[in-house]
Image (cartoon, grey):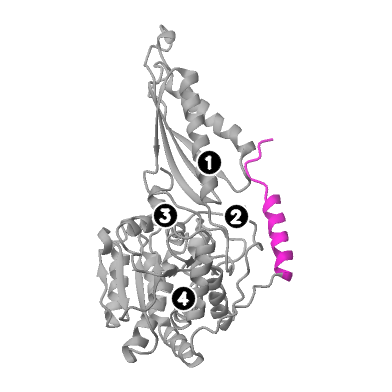
Amino acid sequence: MTRLTPSTAYLNQLDAETARRMQTARTPESPFAGAPAALAAAVEARVDALAGDLNDVVHTLHKDPETAYEEHRSAAFLAGLLQRHGISAELGAHGLPTALRAEAGTGTGPVIAILSEYDALPEVGHACGHNVIAATGAGAFIALAKTLEENPDAFPGRVVFLGTPAEEGHSGKEVLARNGAFDGVDAAIMVHPYAMDLAEQVWLGRRLLTVTFSGMAAHASAQPFMGRNALDAASLAYTGVGLLRQQLPPSDRVHAIITEGGQRPSVIPETAVLKLYARSKYPETLKDLSGRLEDIAAGAALMTGTTVEISWDEHPPSLPVRTNPALTGRWVAAQQRRGRSPLPAGVVSETIAASTDFGNVSYRIPGIHPLIGIAPADVALHTRAFAEAAGSPAAEAGALDGAAGLALTALDYLCDPELRAAVAQEFTDAGGPVDVPAYFD
């Protein structure tokens, strides 16, 4: 009997293991004082006063999803929200028409960036909840900007708001970074919606590979021996990837499709195209995986007498996320003020892992990318169920709590020199900045 419905046994086991770990999980308390209590309370109150505006962001973007680099209405809506609060925003920042930038504060003190995303997925809309991310970043920035407007000496340094397009499959943040968006920025923070509150979770690095095999066409019946079959090469490469999986680290992922393989069965295909995603937990292992995939492609060409063209990263690659523990501690403290308890790393299985272009930011400057719960625990990202959750009352609550968390984390960073020193030292200890554009050369 054909089993059309996948078994949920493995997911059930993962859920049970997560539930057991949750019983004993404890996120370490932050040893840093952060911002003065009265100032933190005032900023948090400003975020709460923005609840109506943030709900508008959540629902307006949710009803009108726009895919990567097409987020014109979404970006304009956010720019209009900032302008209604007296904040000038640059639409089309850093060479991207749907990117946004605004700044608050003056002087030569520390600089922290708060990021928003707002692109959606084809067909399923905001099934990754970027409408919620848009609200969290905008709300946090407006609260801090209004605080400085009332008292320019409320806290030192500057806050930068960046609206970052095209996270889904296109690595918009890497394009922004190459165009100078993070020059002079000391740290960057954002939050992503999820099915539970996590202080930290694994995000895999990702590369895109296109392999084109070229052979020689021939009549498949009369003279097949005069042909060189490009589809055979693509099939062998696809099989080779499948066989490679036995030797891959548990955190590696490779998924592939054959997008071109001939037009008629009576003609030996002279062209075939294989597209692959390669993902891994560490930059070093992603580089190693890339080399092994190239070897498979070259081997398939050799076996079939075809030639091969290997093309990496039609869109810039994404590195894994490098999380900064000191900043994470302040995020957790802020979320605890909101009645949430973000779980530490290791509670949710590392096999539940996707990718994000924020990883590229986190290897340039210190950063955090925590998760905030807006959906039931059994609802996965990139599903219609999660898209529905992204327009729910839980999404409204997540947007408000997320905005408060980002505002308070940024405030702590700007106000507490000991925290900033620890953030910088942790970043150095983790390997310091990486030349992302040149990393895979």
Q: Position of residue 298 (x, y in %)?
A: 47, 27
At 40% from the left and 86% from the top, the residue drawn is 155
Q: Which residue is mark 2?
A: 352
As drawn, which residue projects farthest toward the top? 222
What residue do we see at 31% from left, 76% from top?
Answer: 103
Majority secondary structure of the magenta segment? helix
Q: Give the spatial CA distance, label 1 vs label 2.
A: 22 Å
Q: Earlier in the sequence, mark 1 or mark 2?
A: 1
Against 268, is 402 above or below? below
Amino acid carrying label 4: it is: Leu
* Residue hosting label 1: 288
Q: CA distance from mark 2 to mark 3?
A: 17 Å
Count neighbours of disc 2 (C-alpha within 10 A) and say few if under 14, some if 14 to 19, many if 20 or more.
Answer: few
**Is disc 4 placed on a helix, strand or loop?**
helix
Residues at badges 1 and 2 in contact (C-beta under 8 Å)?
no
Question: Does residue 177 appear to the left or right of 388 in the view shown?
Answer: left
Point out the frontmost of discs 2 and 4. 4
> Which residue matches tag 4?
406
